[in-house]
Image: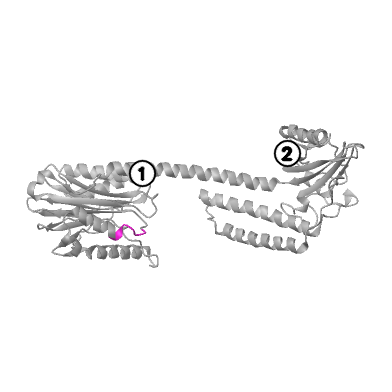
């Protein structure tokens, strides 16, 4: 019902129809764009961020739908008030009724006359409150009987402030419908003053905002879920980084092993993170001088990311060092690492290359488990060593790993690396093919560095060249490179 006007308020002029039509067009266009964004949001219920995005879009759509219908009312004028309330259908019935009801069925009005103690409700208010349209409207004293006990004091305060202090009403409360359903109602109203300035009556507009508040609660709940998930992810990432830093050698330059004397190896290594810095995986590199004077060189990678994978990498690296110190040769060492992975509670797959360098004879013994072969650079050219047999660690029980030997010369440069230096080809029809092509590209680009390696003075200079070549690449996975230069 149209609001009463006080004597000191002039009648508002209706807005121009063309202006409102333009606003309606803009609202509907924006609603379509928001709906398109909602459809693009991830549909995986396990994805907290996707749930939050969909909840935000649903809330925005709900508000835009209301705005569209509000503007339509502004253009077309207020709905006609039925002469008899009995002519108004009850809530949820009649043509055009929907699950949530139209905006008109969710906005009603009322007036309470303080002089005659009479009440007048619009038909829409009967629908909101779930009241029989033939029943008389409730007075202000009777209205709290519909309100939840917890919200009654708030309603009483709002009405009292309006009637006594002439304050406008603007607040929400929950009502219980006869069918037991609980709805949230937003009430806005003002006192109507008589000629003496006394409050003669009070009018109000009441709106069912249950769906709107439900959407807002959903947004809040999904936001909190997303925050918790992000906090867990950040904590796990920090633990994975700390564990990785604690395990990998903290090299800042070339490393020489003093026990080898004049035939010392010049060793340097570098870890290259993925383009997504949150993905900390199970990549490792290591160089360790053994009690018998030999040197252990190894790189490897466990599949996956996170604390579990990083801790698994730490376990493997610890076992590898222990067995190497005990004198285990590379082929047998990988066999036992495979048994170790096979016996773990959480199945895992990994690749590795393990080398033992004997400085007395400049002999390299090595084995591999599904891993790129070491690259040998000599006299300005490079090649990949012929790889002995070896399957991925954890792929099968009882796997046997072959072992190869190669004689090295003074000035030779040995390069070990993991996959992931270059991105996989997304246009390859087979994921295995994509990975093999990416690995081939990385090897070729490394071999192309042979002339520059020949001019380098230290292993660290060579590592720096590799980082310059691959460091800015958008890698899908982390990677590492280890370079050992044979001293005189």
Give the residue drawn at x 62%, y 44%: 217
Percent of width and height locating residue 122: 84, 48
Give the residue drawn at x 17%, y 54%: 458
Q: Is residue 473 one of those drawn in magenta?
A: yes
Percent of width and height locating residue 422: 32, 61
- Asked whether residue 370 appears in the rendered view, the answer is no
Give the residue drawn at x 61%, y 58%: 34
* Distance Cα–Cα, label 1 vs label 2: 49 Å
Q: Furthest residue to the right?
A: 116
Q: Quadrant of the C terminus?
A: bottom left
* Image: 56 above or below 117: below
Numbered mark located on residue 240 in the image: 1
* Image: 117 above or below 462: above
- Do the numbered discs 1 and 2 sit on residues whose CB atoms are within 8 Å? no
Mark 2, secondary structure of its residue: strand
Instruction: Depth check: give the residue in front, 369 or 416.
Output: 416
Give the magenta part as a residue range. 469-474
Which image quadrant for residue 37? bottom right
Percent of width and height locating residue 73: 78, 56
Q: Main secondary structure of the magenta part?
A: loop
The local crowd at label 2, few if under 14, some if 14 to 19, many if 20 or more residues have their Cα within 10 Å, is some
Mark 1, secondary structure of its residue: helix
Q: Is residue 384 left or right of residue 200?
A: left
Q: Is residue 450 one of those drawn in magenta?
A: no
Q: Is residue 181 left or right of residue 369?
A: right
- Asked whether residue 282 appears in the rendered view, the answer is yes
Write down the residue under mark 2.
Answer: 173
Which image quadrant for residue 39? bottom right
Q: Is residue 44 left or right of residue 345?
A: right
The local crowd at label 1, few if under 14, some if 14 to 19, many if 20 or more residues have their Cα within 10 Å, is many
């Amino acid at each position: 019902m149209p609001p009463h006007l006080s004597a000191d308020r002039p009648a508002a002029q209706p807005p121009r129809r063309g202006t409102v039509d333009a606003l309606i067009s803009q609202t509907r266009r924006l609603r379509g764009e928001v709906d398109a964004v909602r459809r693009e949001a991830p549909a995986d219920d396990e994805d907290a961020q996707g749930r939050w995005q969909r909840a935000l879009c649903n809330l925005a759509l709900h508000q835009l739908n209301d705005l569209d219908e509000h503007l339509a009312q502004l253009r077309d004028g207020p709905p006609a008030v039925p002469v008899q309330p009995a002519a108004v259908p009850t809530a949820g019935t009649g043509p055009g009724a929907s699950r949530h009801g139209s905006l008109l069925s969710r906005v009603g009005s009322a007036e309470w006359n303080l002089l005659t103690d009479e009440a007048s409700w619009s038909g829409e208010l009967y629908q909101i409150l779930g009241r029989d349209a033939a029943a008389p409207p409730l007075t202000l004293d009777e209205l709290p009987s519909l309100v939840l006990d917890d919200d009654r004091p708030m309603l009483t305060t709002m009405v009292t402030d309006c009637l006594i202090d002439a304050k406008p009403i603007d607040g929400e409360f929950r009502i219980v419908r006869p069918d037991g359903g609980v709805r949230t109602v937003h009430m806005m109203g003002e006192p109507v003053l008589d000629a003496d300035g006394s409050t003669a009556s009070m009018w109000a507009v009441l709106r069912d905002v249950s769906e709107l508040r439900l959407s807002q609660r959903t947004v809040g709940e999904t936001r909190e879920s997303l925050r918790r998930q992000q906090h867990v992810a950040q904590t796990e990432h920090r633990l994975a980084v700390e564990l990785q830093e604690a395990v990998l050698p903290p090299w800042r330059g070339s490393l020489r092993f003093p026990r080898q004397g004049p035939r010392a190896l010049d060793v340097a290594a570098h870890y290259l993170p993925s383009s997504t810095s949150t993905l900390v995986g199970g990549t490792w590199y290591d160089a360790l001088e053994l009690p018998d004077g030999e040197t252990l060189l190894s790189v490897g990678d466990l599949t996956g990311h996170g604390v579990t994978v990083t801790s698994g990498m730490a376990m493997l690296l610890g076992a590898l060092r222990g067995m190497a110190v005990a004198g285990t040769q590379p082929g047998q060492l990988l066999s036992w690492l495979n048994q170790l992975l096979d016996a773990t509670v959480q199945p895992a797959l990994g690749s590795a290359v393990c080398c033992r360098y004997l400085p007395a004879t400049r002999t390299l013994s090595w084995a591999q488990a599904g891993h790129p072969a070491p690259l040998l650079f000599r006299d300005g050219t490079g090649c990949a060593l012929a790889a002995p047999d070896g399957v991925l660690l954890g792929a099968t029980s009882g796997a046997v790993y072959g072992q190869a030997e190669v004689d090295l010369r003074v000035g030779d440069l040995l390069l070990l690396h993991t996959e992931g230096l270059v991105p996989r080809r997304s246009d390859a029809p087979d994921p295995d093919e994509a990975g093999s092509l990416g690995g081939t590209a990385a090897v070729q680009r490394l071999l192309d560095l042979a002339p520059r390696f020949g001019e380098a003075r230290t292993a660290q200079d060579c590592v720096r060249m590799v980082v310059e070549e691959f460091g800015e690449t958008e890698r899908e996975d982390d990677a590492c490179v280890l370079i050992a230069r044979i001293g005189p």
